[in-house]
Image (tube, helix red, strand yellow):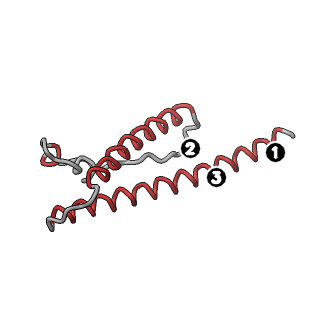
Amino acid sequence: MNETTLLEQLLEYKKSLQLAQKTNESISEHLVGSIIQILKYGEKYNIVIPKRDLLEQILLNTRHLWNEHNLAVDKFNQKSDKNMTNRKVTLPKPTEDETEPGTRFCIICG
């Protein structure tokens, strides 16, 4: 196997990894948005959401995973070509009301 063939295979593999990454990010963003809407709807209409604590834990875990992802992207960008653009996940900033003690899921929502 010559270097050109190996390089072409690596570039194709990289493209498929980037597509998988984009797909995972999109699914995660939709999942988080859906969970937030369910929790807000439950609060607005005083509906008890079954396993609410589990949904809130998913949001907290997602925040942690996105932070880890962004750290990895930063590390990769430091080592890679400046022309390459890698996507970082941006989370909404909580408002002052959402950072008050007793606020449960709103640290994730904007």
The furthest residue to the bottom: 45
What separation in Å lies between label 1 and label 3 (alpha carbons)?
17 Å
Towards the viewer: 17 or 41: 41
Q: Where the N terminus falls, by quadrant?
A: top right
Identify the residue shown where x is 52% and y is 46%. Answer: 85
Residue indicated by mark 2: 84
Instruction: Give amino acid for label 1.
Output: Thr
Q: Amino acid at mark 3?
A: Ser
SS assignment at label 1: helix
Q: Residues within 10 Å of mark 1 (few under 14, many from 20)?
A: few
The first of marks 1 and 3 along the sequence is: 1
Numbered-mark total: 3
Give the amino acid type for the residue marked by disc 2 in the picture: Met
Query: Badge 2: few (under 14), some or many (20 or more) residues near its Cα, within 10 Å?
Result: few
Disc 2, SS: loop
Q: Quadrant of residue 96?
A: top left
Name the residue at 28% across, 49% down: 108
Q: Position of residue 109 (x, y in %)?
A: 26, 53
The location of residue 86, given as percent across then percent down, is 51, 45
**Which of label 1 and label 2 is nearer to you?**
1
The residue under the point 43% across, 40% down is 70
Residue occupied by mark 1? 5
First in residue order: circle 1 vs circle 2: 1
Q: Is residue 46 above or below residue 56?
A: below
Provide the residue designation for mark 3: 16
Determine the CA span between mark 2 and mark 3.
16 Å
